[in-house]
Amino acid sequence: MRSTSHAAMWLAGAAALMLPTGSMAQAYSAQAAPIDGTVLEVSATGRVTRTPDQAVIRAGVVTQAPTAAAATQENASRMAQVIASLKSAGIAQRDLSTSNVSLQPQYRYADNQPPVVTGYQAINSVSVKFRDIARSGAVLDALVKAGANQIDGPSLSLSQPDAALDAARTDAVARAKARAALYAQAAGLRVDSILSINEAGENDGGQPQPPVMFRARAMAADSGPATQVLPGETEVSATINVRFVLK
């Protein structure tokens, strides 16, 4: 009797494990249910254009001297003037960050001779974020007058890309639906429903454009026209994969 009771309990437990219940049963049924129709998978990219409203430029000082200490000291003195000019121009502390500090020996090379150290080069540069692109050209000119002799950039972007990304996503869905309707019509079918939507990638307009790179020359306070930075347009995009059911 005891052995029979244990066997009955084991069979009841095994049966309970084999029978899906509640949400598990619903998930099992959904996965097992065949798709009624033809599945079409479409990839589409939605795009919108916006005018960048912020720029990032790297500005710095390159100095050379016979000794490492002299190159570093001169660089620090001139860089202090550059940073002071940025703050005087209204650039906030949060928009300034050191991007590069380096000290490298300079060599003279000759045939069949070991390299000879002729001096040292010190570089110190800061990354400057301009929240008003229209003011950036005047600030660049002030930087050069303050002693900056190396300027790279600008990298233009959107400060708040979320709304533009949503517009690109909406455009991507519209493009996917239009493409699915085209395939369905060509096949003599119609779009019945959407099985899934998967976002495959996005570009929020923060990708740096090919940088305008130059080394600024020292200039007098009143020499030449002011530097201009033109924002142009940047593209914001979103790519999705959509699975449709055609009937």
Image (cartoon, rainbow, N blue to C red):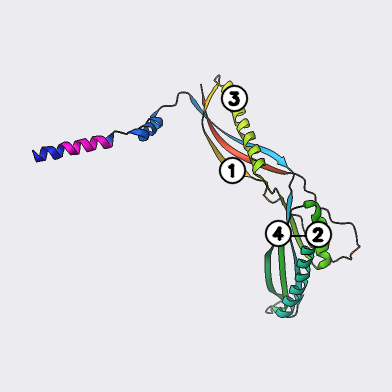
Residue hosting label 4: 95
Q: Residue furthest left?
A: 1
Left or right: 202 in relation to 53: left
- The answer to whether 199 appears left or right of 1 in the picture is right
| Percent position of residue 34, x then y | 41, 27
Magenta stretch encompasses residue 9 = yes
Q: Residues within 10 Å of mark 4 (few under 14, many from 20)?
A: few
Identify the image quadrant of residue 42. Answer: top right
Find the magenta span and give its range. Answer: 8-17
Mark 2 vs 4, N-terminal side: 4
Q: Is residue 33 left or right of residue 70?
A: left
First reached walking from the N terminus: tag 4 or tag 1: 4
Q: Secondary structure at mark 4?
A: helix
Residue at image x 71%, y 80%?
69
- First along the sequence among labels 2 and 3: 2
Q: Are marks 4 and 3 in contact (CB under 8 Å)?
A: no
92 vs 223, left or right, is left
Q: Is residue 183 visible?
A: yes
Q: CA distance from mark 1 to mark 3?
A: 23 Å
Q: Identify which amino acid the numbered label 4 is placed on.
A: Asp
Residue 201 — which label? 1
Question: Which residue does the numbered mark 3 point to in the structure image?
Answer: 181
In space, the residues marked 2 and 4 are separated at their CA atoms by: 13 Å
Q: Which label sits on residue 139? A: 2
